[in-house]
Image (cartoon, rainbow, N blue to C red):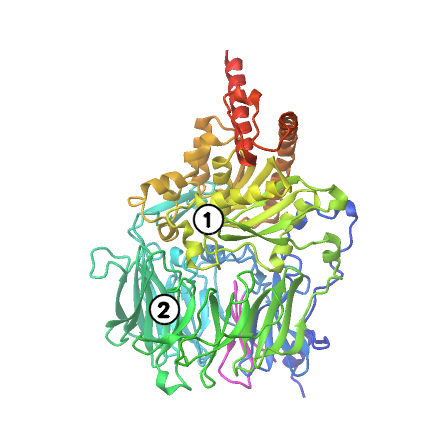
Amino acid sequence: MQSAKTKKRKNLKHSRSFDCEMPVTDTTILNSLDDCIIFPVEEIVQYPLPGYGAPTSISFSPDDSLITYLFSSDNSLNRKVFTFDLETCKQELVFGPPDGGLDESNISAEEKLRRERSRERGLGVTRYEWVKTSLKKKTIMVPSPAGVYFQDLSLQPELKLPSTSSSPIIDPHLSPDGTMLASVRDYELHVLNLLNNESKQLTFGADGNGLTHGLAEYIAQEEMDRKNGYWWSLDSKLIAFTEVDSSEIPLFRIMHQGKNTAGPEAQEDHAYPFVRASNVKVRLGVVSATGGPVTWMDLHCGEKGGANNDEEYLARVNWMHGNILTAQVLNRSHSKLKILRFDIKTGQRKVILVEEQDTWINLHDCFSPLDKGLAEFSGGFIWASERTGFRHLYLHDMNGACLGSITDGDWMVEQIAGIDEAAGLVYFTGTLDSPLESHLYCAKLIPDGNDSLRAPQRLTHRKGRHMVVLDHQMQRFIDIHDSLDSPPRISLCSLQGGNLIMHLHEQPFTIPRFKRLQLEPPEIIQIQANDGTVLYGALYKPDVAKFGPPPYKTLISVYGGPSVQLVSDSWMNTVDMRAQYFRSKGILIWKLDNRGSARRGLEFEGSLKLNVGRIDAEDQLTGAKWLIKQGLANVDHIGLYGWSYGGYLSAMTLARFPDIFRCAVSGAPVTSWDGYDTFYTEKYMGLPSENREGYEFSSVMRHVDNIEGKLLLVHGKIDENVHFRHTSRLVNALVEAGKPYELLIFPDERHMPRRLRDRILACANKIRGGGEERRRRREGGRRRRRVEKKIGRRRRKEGGEGAIKIGWRRRRGCGEAEGLDELLAAEAQAARRRRRQRRRRRQR
């Protein structure tokens, strides 16, 4: 018989059979609309994007019999936890938060800032963990604003650790054996014993203002991709944690000027480490999970005048088998990384590996300890290095000595997906087939000793991007695949050759939103930079049948900064809704990954070293000239838009090349790198004292006198990442230079606008600005056509197609123009001269 509790729990579930498929998006949610409103502005900023309502955060249960994932049955951002039984092929809702789960209004200030760091938009349930105490008992842990829930899949959810608004629970994580739960509360590390429900505080002395325990500092979260400040040992007996001291960093105050009140509740202070200033001090300690004294490791990151001045940043912390603690430490110039091994009883250290690069060190998560199956390598590890210019895997023994390379070539390893030590195999994702794609590969863990390595075996077969999750038994993997032509689809595959076992989720193109929006994937283009380097671009061309043949009005979508790739064989490019909107209105959209962007190797990315704002802008100019040369765009009809680094590059390119670009939308831009943080800025630009010319040239304010086109600035007033002062400084320079500008401010938004109405307004203003600019472009186009007619008459008179000599322009001092570039520059110069003459006449 079933208990009343069990019956009640059963009524909360929704079991359905999907013929071996996980759920598809509900096709009744969005109704068809008339063609006249195919693309309302709201569609551009609506999340999730079309096709990205697929399950996320996919994992296997400890016994590999179930797949769990987050999913929203109403195609919203509000997700719940579902399971899919691989034997019965049934999916089931197993956890929906009793309190409704997370939304933007019920989380603490600290959690809001952590969501900013991770660019998290999800609501409801945003993450979960499997409890691994028993293979028979299936339980998950789910954090929520109300506290931490534990959900036995056959019972009601239990709120094990309640949270309060005055003392929220931050970053809870289970121990590897599933018997304890660690979290940070009131800036101190706590542990809850799940067997007897006893809670214990492990650290003491934090005040929250200048000293914290177990929390990653701002720089670690924002720039180093390290979100955690504590780490469980593999045997669940110890916890390593950070002590962060920010007391010596001056606080940067941000005022909430959109609030109805004043005072402390309308302001916030941040320990923000500006370039060339001090960083936080970080110590690493180890404490027993049952409490007791802390053993401090011999590590003092960020301290001046110590014995180890080249240890500025604590980048990564890893436990190895046998309770060996390791830490990766980076110097301030990003040229040297050390891996340290600690004796956790004494805190003494040993350097086991040193990585050095003239360009810079890129941090990664490809450190994997080895333990079983290969006795001769017990205690060793796999490490990824860019010593050849591309990130590849290497085998090291327990003392750090390199035993040989596992992969090589002019391509890069992205992530280690899993290691089968018994079979001597390592599984990883990489770019072997194309820098625009990502595939799962398999390579031998033990080098053969031959001069050349055997090529890795590819296990994913469709072109595009593949994200993978391996099961615990190293037999199967989940393949999350998407491409320009295909929205995310999820399959279960065999690790023996990558053969398909079953389809789990596939979103058909018959879904009304796909059909209504008439999405067309962009065309991938290859062009050459001025040094011959191959650059990849994406071209969104308007419908010829609807808008006629080119040239078209053109907008360039830019980012251009390091660690980001815009152009790839991914569905994300197909559902770039802003690009698709403009395309539907007859505007050509172009994206280009300039030198300095990601996934092309260290030499390609290192082109930006000490040259931010120079090579990246010049490559965007090269892309625009290619469009003009191909007859796709006209000069005086090209604009740019971008956000963050893309906002900076939009403004910079507009200012540096006024002959080509007529308008720009610059969102949350860094306008001068002396006002950004230490880690990011000094990695790419060095210290201001060592690169004074580079800092001066890279400032947008240096070039405002050249701006001829229109500039729209968009920024959130409480942006704690790229402060609003960047936009304010640029506005001051524009006013001083007598340059017009438009400004759109969001008083209550940070670096990433979150409220729907704000995102709609930002998008609508970009579109409105484009309409005003189009009227100006029409005037410029008529002027260009007059010039072309005069050139044509001159050519016919001379009877040839050689050099163009324009007498009327020479009389204005422009001389001869040979070719498109010189012609455009000469005409622009003449136009500026005429404008100056008109201004002088008006002043008289």
> Could you tell me if residue 247 is visible in this image?
yes
| Residue name at image x 45 percent, y 32 percent | 704
Relative to the observer, which residue lies in front, 172 or 372?
372
Is 29 placed left or right of 451 in the picture? right
Secondary structure at badge 2 equals strand
Residue farthest to the bottom, as pictured? 1
Could you tell me the amino acid type at mark 2? Val
Could you tell me the amino acid type at mark 1? Asp
Where does the image place residue 592, in percent across and percent down from the top left? Answer: 55, 49
Badge 1 is on which residue?
531
Question: Any mark on residue 689, and which?
Answer: none
Does the magenta portion include 142?
yes
Mark 2: few/some/many CA within 10 Å (<14, 14-19, 20+): many
Badge 2 is on which residue?
317
Secondary structure at badge 1 equals loop
Q: Quarter of the image containing the N terminus?
A: bottom right
| Residue name at image x 67 percent, y 40 percent | 551
Where does the image place residue 688, in percent across and percent down from the top left? Answer: 32, 44
> Could you tell me if residue 156 is visible in this image?
no
> Mark 2 or mark 1: which comes first in sequence?
2
Residue farthest to the top, as pictured? 844
Relative to the observer, which residue lies in front, 478 or 227?
478
Q: Are marks 2 and 1 in contact (CB under 8 Å)?
A: no
Relative to the observer, which residue lies in front, 578 or 814?
814
Relative to the observer, which residue lies in front, 147 or 819?
819
Residue span colored magenta = 127-156
Image: 328 above or below 33: below
Where does the image place residue 286, in percent across and percent down from the top left? Answer: 31, 72
Where does the image place residue 442, in percent across and percent down from the top left? Answer: 51, 76
For the residues labelled 2 and 1, the Cα–Cα distance comes to 40 Å
Which quadrant holds residue 153? Answer: bottom right
